[in-house]
């Protein structure tokens, strides 16, 4: 039996976290949530996660900065950035940080699930 993947969702807006969780719940993942980069990094200290989906624009710390720190702490985790302003994210910075995908808000639920599933399968 394949172990259940643990997914960390990070967004400063509770309603977005709830929507992301609803989108992924049926996939059978173990889901952790954090409303800040600080909370997310604290959760990473507590164990291994298989994927991190982070909002880009958050108070105090951008999603890019969070995912860079997360890569150092949990290098095997797939990193995906979620943004309402995807055109503001430089593709070369994403590549340099090893971010696998950029998901635009509002997201297509089927495409988000497929992106995450593919990233987990090919890591």
Image (cartoon, helix red, strand yellow):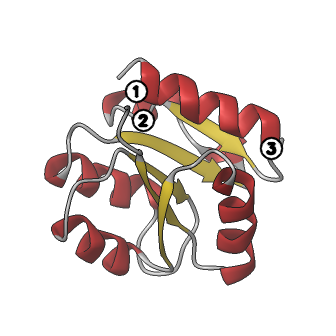
Residue lying at the far front of the rendered structure: 1
Near mark 3 (Cα within 10 A), the count class, few <14, some 14-19 or many ≥20, is some
Say which quarter of the image contains residue 60. bottom left
- Name the secondary structure under disc 1: helix
The total of numbered circles placed on residues is: 3
Residue 83 x/y as whole percent: 66, 53
Say which quarter of the image contains residue 3. top left
Mark toward the viewer: 1 or 3 = 3
**Residue identifier under label 1:** 95
Viewed as shown, does residue 77 lie left or right of 33?
left
11 above or below 109? below
Q: Quadrant of the C terminus?
A: top left
Query: Which dot marks residue 34?
Result: none
Say which quarter of the image contains residue 120. top left
- Name the secondary structure under disc 3: helix
**Residue identifier under label 2:** 99
Q: Residue at x 31, y 42 (%)?
A: 77
């Amino acid at each position: 039996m394949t172990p259940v993947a643990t997914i960390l969702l990070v967004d400063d807006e509770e309603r977005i976290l709830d929507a992301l969780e609803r989108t992924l719940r049926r996939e059978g993942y173990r889901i952790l949530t954090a409303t800040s980069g600080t909370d997310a990094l604290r959760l990473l200290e507590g164990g291994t996660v298989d994927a991190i989906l982070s909002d880009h624009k958050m108070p105090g710390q951008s999603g890019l900065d969070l995912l860079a720190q997360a890569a150092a702490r949990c290098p095997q985790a797939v990193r995906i950035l979620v943004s309402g302003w995807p055109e503001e994210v430089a593709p070369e910075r994403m590549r340099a940080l090893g971010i696998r995908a950029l998901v635009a808000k509002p997201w297509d639920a089927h495409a988000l699930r497929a992106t995450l599933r593919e990233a987990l399968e090919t890591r």
